[in-house]
Image: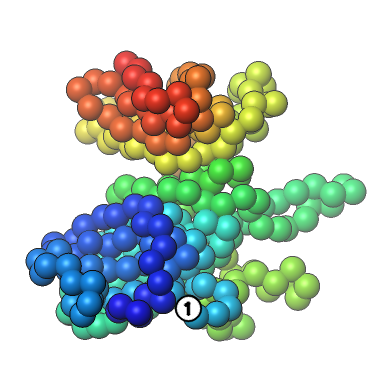
């Protein structure tokens, strides 16, 4: 048991802040390591802090698979893809700025709002599937879901204390109760699902959902900066989205792959796709 971690789990993703490595640590949530000291499996001095590891019960950060940081007005927040638990937001300021341990405070964990029509009525529910990846660009967070698609949020909405949303909200891991109607979840700016794109009905029966993704931000020439996402879409191949308007993602291209697309990377004008059984697939941007 090192740094509050009950046992080693899969490490899915990492991002860095100075000497600290912030690792999306599966069922252990978010683990922070000090990269300036040698790793010591006996003393664990390289393990700075953890949030999300629990000996029993519901893990507050679900099964973390990705993490991204956002800085604003002297504060630092981590947005975590929490698998079947949705999205987690953690205030990292005391740890990363003030050097205090554990120094991490859970702001909220929630599953995105899903609206469904049932018997002529709109039913409010929770996103199906699990979140996979998250990118924070400027003041927006973009999250991929394996069956729900992609969702975008204003960071100002994600970091807002739940008590300010509704005084009845007291548990950061329980923001929605279908029985009482209590709902303190932030509202997404936009959602995109390839199979539900009204401009492309040909993809309605396509299998696959959003996995890991790469984003590229281009300087503004006229209007908004151009923001392009390359999203691995599992059995659905790869999609290219223009997301310069956070509220209006637009599909630019779709390509099938031989295997199951799980991640993308950009280098030298090419898009490299980790295609599981299909190996590595390379496309021109």
Vertical comparison of 282 with 151: above or below: above
Tell me the residue at 25%/83% (across/down). Answer: 101
Question: Would residue 82 be found to the left or right of residue 274 on screen?
Answer: right
Vertical comparison of 193 with 100: above or below: above
Quarter of the picture containing the N terminus is: bottom left
Q: Nearer the viewer, residue 189 or 279?
A: 279
Q: Place residue 7 in its image quadrant.
A: bottom left
Tell me the residue at 30%/49% (across/down). Answer: 138
Question: Would residue 118 be found to the left or right of residue 211 on screen?
Answer: right
Residue matched to label 1? 54
Tell me the residue at 74%/68% (across/down). Answer: 178
Tell me residue 80's x, y (percent). 41, 60
Tell me residue 243's x, y (percent). 41, 35
Q: Nearer the viewer, residue 61 or 11?
A: 11
Tell me the residue at 80%/47% (across/down). Answer: 117
Tell me residue 244's x, y (percent). 38, 35
Vertical comparison of 265 with 152: above or below: above
Q: Nearer the viewer, residue 111 or 121?
A: 111
Tell me residue 141's x, y (percent). 40, 52
Q: Is residue 222 visible?
A: yes
């Amino acid at each position: 048991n090192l740094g509050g971690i009950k046992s080693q789990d899969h490490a899915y993703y990492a991002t860095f802040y100075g000497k600290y490595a912030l690792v999306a640590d599966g069922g252990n949530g978010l683990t922070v390591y000090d990269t300036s000291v040698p790793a010591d499996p006996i003393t664990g001095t390289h393990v700075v802090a953890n949030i999300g590891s629990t000996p029993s019960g519901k893990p507050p950060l679900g099964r973390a698979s990705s993490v991204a940081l956002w800085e604003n007005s002297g504060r630092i927040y981590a947005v975590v893809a929490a698998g079947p638990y949705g999205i987690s937001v953690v205030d990292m300021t005391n740890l990363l700025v003030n050097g205090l341990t554990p120094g991490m405070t859970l702001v909220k964990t929630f599953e995105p709002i899903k609206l469904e029509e049932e018997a002529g009525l709109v039913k409010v529910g929770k996103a199906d599937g699990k979140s996979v990846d998250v990118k924070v660009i400027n003041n927006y967070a973009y999250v991929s879901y394996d069956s729900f698609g992609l969702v975008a949020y204003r960071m100002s909405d994600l970091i807002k204390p739940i008590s300010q949303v509704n005084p009845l909200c007291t548990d950061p891991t329980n923001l929605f109760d279908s029985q009482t109607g209590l709902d303190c979840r932030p509202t997404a700016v936009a959602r995109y699902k390839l199979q539900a794109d009204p401009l492309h009905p040909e993809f309605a029966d396509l299998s696959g959902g959003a996995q890991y993704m790469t984003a590229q931000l281009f300087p503004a020439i006229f209007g908004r900066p151009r923001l392009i996402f390359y999203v691995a879409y599992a059995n659905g191949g790869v999609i290219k989205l223009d997301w310069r308007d956070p509220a209006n993602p637009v599909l630019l291209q779709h390509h099938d792959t031989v295997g199951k697309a799980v991640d993308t990377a950009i280098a030298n004008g090419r898009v490299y796709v980790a295609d599981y059984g299909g190996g590595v697939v390379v496309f021109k941007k």
